[in-house]
Amino acid sequence: MEAHFHRITITILAIFLPILLSLPRFIPSTTTSRAWSKLKSIFIYPAAFSKHHREPVAGALIPTRGQIMYIFLLSLLNLILLVAPYTITQPQSSFTSRSRQLLSIIGNRAGQMAMGNVVALFLFSSRNSILLYLTDWSHNTYLLLHRWLGYWAVLHTVIHSAMLWSYYVKVGTYSSEFLRLYWIWGIVGTVAMCAIVPFSLPIIRKLFYEFFLVSHVALSLLFLVGYYYHIWYVYTYNWGYEIWMFVAAGIWAVERLVRVCRMVVRGSSTAIVTVIPDTDEEYIKIEIEGKDLKGGVAYLCFPTLSWRFWETHPFSVSGSIPHHQQDLTHSGSNSSSDLTPDTDTNPEKRASVFVTPSSTVITTEPHDPHPSTIFYARTRSGITKTLTNKAFGSDTKQMRLRVLIEGPYNHSGRIHSQLAQCSGILCIAGGVGITACLPLLKQNKSKEIKLFWSSRKAGLVAELRPTLNAFPENVEVETLVGQRFDVDSIIMRELVDCEERSKGALAVVVSGPPGLADDVRQMVTRTVRSSKRSRPYLLVDEAFNW
Amino acid sequence: MVSLRIWLTSSLTTLQLYIPQAHADGTGLIGYGKTLYNPTCTFACRNVIRKQTLACTPSSSSENHGTAHNPVSTPPKCFVQDHVFLKTIALCIDTYCTLSDKPSAKLIEDYWASHLGTGTLGNYEYVPVLSYKDALAAARLDEENARGSNASSSTPTSIPEGLKPYKVTSPLGVTTGGSSALNATRLVGPVQWQLQYNYLSDFETNEKGHSTMT
């Protein structure tokens, strides 16, 4: 077996291009280079057009310029390699005319190219994708590219079906072809593949996420089964076409296995879900006993919550605390310095009055060596709604239930080396987006850190006040309730007008709703493009509502 | 759990894929470990005459030993034991392969051992009763005898526009394939051979292209 697999163009390029394009991060001074920052502000970070990237425009997400370059290159290749190169020698025994031969060849090429895209897009959708370890691209980026490869997979599948249909109609054997099992399974595959599109529309994902997920998995597997028998009934395993299916199915199966293994390793724990007071039941805290997760995204499974016991949902790890800390910080919060006059002490008092029975119990065991991991979530539809309703329905406004943890994952890409080169971090957080920032703030003690956090609900700020107050001196915190920060002037100040001593690279981390993330993205890139003395920077968009 | 069963079988077969095994056409994707028609010239020979009836071809059976699009009524066992078929193929290989692909003797021997019974997909199970050398020698002897008795009785076939067949003749006369009986050693017609060669060569080149571009 010859090892010429580097020449399998689409599949290999789709998978290896991200690795290649992520390599510049290893060039020592790129992060601290102003020219590199300028390039990123022009070619990589901004939305391809308009100012929206995270916020959908007419139901569609606009890629960044960096993403659009990848999409453009892959699309160009998908198009060019579909129509060329071919070898045609006429006359010959099987194809009676040039046009018929072309119909058959291009149709067959489209069929195989669909599978090349399928292999790559299966990998891109994986939580445990090797690419998330080898590149500095985020899971969000891969999910966006997963969709674009998906468009090509669908297009190639439709072209394959249509052209071979047309070919056999021209040859005159379509009616007998239609009765053959391979053709019928081909129809199954094509229909399953096409059905994925309407079932994955943004509106469906938003309103019926669980339905989208189940249909997505079911239709994808039906497509693979359809493809498998489509090949089996003509070629069995004679010509290697089945390999594409085995590779795609292998990626899927291994990924699922790794998920289960990660969950088993973590074991089963108890979660305490508390409705955060003074937030109109809009925010909940999930505390998992005996687990010490530092950061990242963990997928939580609440097997006893509903009949869909298999579902896992992503939550940003806010950090871990020793069991007894909760009470200590509550009592200390009033005396510690308050950087934000906007949030008066009133909600805080109410928060400290609201000492839950469980935390009282915990304080009686101050030497408990087991830490707890904390998550915060905003109540929306689906699982968070169910959790909130159940917790709110109890007298104590909290509930205990079984939880399985899968993760945590680093979904932001491998940005550690770049982050290490930054002298400061500017965190702009909105609402529950604060959770993704907290681990970052704790772990970078030697950097100058500024956190600007706005929340619509005073209760959430009050809840986190002890945590914020406990930060060391290198962290400056400003909070706002019910209003938004003037993002433009913050960015201008931190990137351009800052003092000489902090001219090193700045990591701009935004974690919040799409509108805020897009504002920050636009302002940062515009500022760096137009300013001659702006700091080199790194933009991290911690998307939390995918 | 149908899906579970499918995954179980698929993982087993994946495993099987990686266990090295003697396979006439290789393992992998076409162009990457697997070949379709290697060498093309020999496959073109067989393709022209595969549908002709041989002495051992069952007349009653309707079993198809070819593909859906190209049904073949002669079973593999019959192909490898029919002297006329073997001699005709040997003469064809010696005539056209030396002009076109120029494959090594070893490659021809391998084709002879694995593909005469089945056609496209190689199978060493069907062992020809004559070796390639013996079959070719016998065919040449037939030619000598024919030359003695009668001059070449070649019936000129019309050449399709754009086709450039080799100018080859034989005192045995040519066969143009089809479904007629093959009851004496013949030279495979240059026009029919060239048409098959063009088809097979195009097909494999494009299949390799599909693998490469995907």
Image (tube, coloured by chain):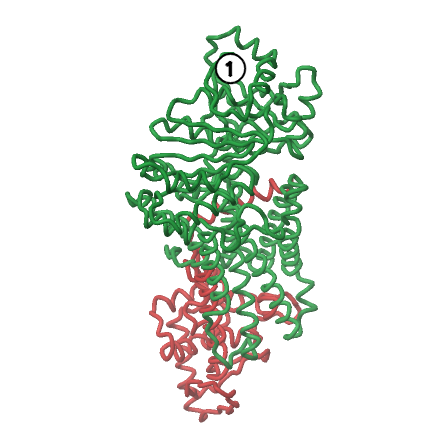
Chain colours: A green, B red
In the depicted structure, whether residue A47 falls above or below residue B34: above
Residue toward you, B131 or A17: A17
- The residue wearing badge 1 is A334
- Residue A380 in the image, given as x and y percentages of width and height: 65, 34
- Disc 1 marks a residue whose amino acid type is Asn
Residue toward you, A397 or A16: A397
Residue toward you, A171 or A340: A340
Horizontal side of residue A194 vs A329, given as left or right: right
- Name the secondary structure under disc 1: loop
Horizontal side of residue B102 vs A66, given as left or right: left
Q: Residue at x 45, y 55 (%)?
A: A70
Q: Give me the chain letter of mark 1.
A: A
- Residue A35 in the image, given as x and y percentages of width and height: 32, 50
Q: Residue at x 43, y 58 (%)?
A: A8
User: Which image quadrant for residue A313?
Assistant: top right
Q: Is residue B14 visible?
A: yes
Q: Residue at x 69, y 23 (%)?
A: A390
- Residue B38 in the image, given as x and y percentages of width and height: 42, 67
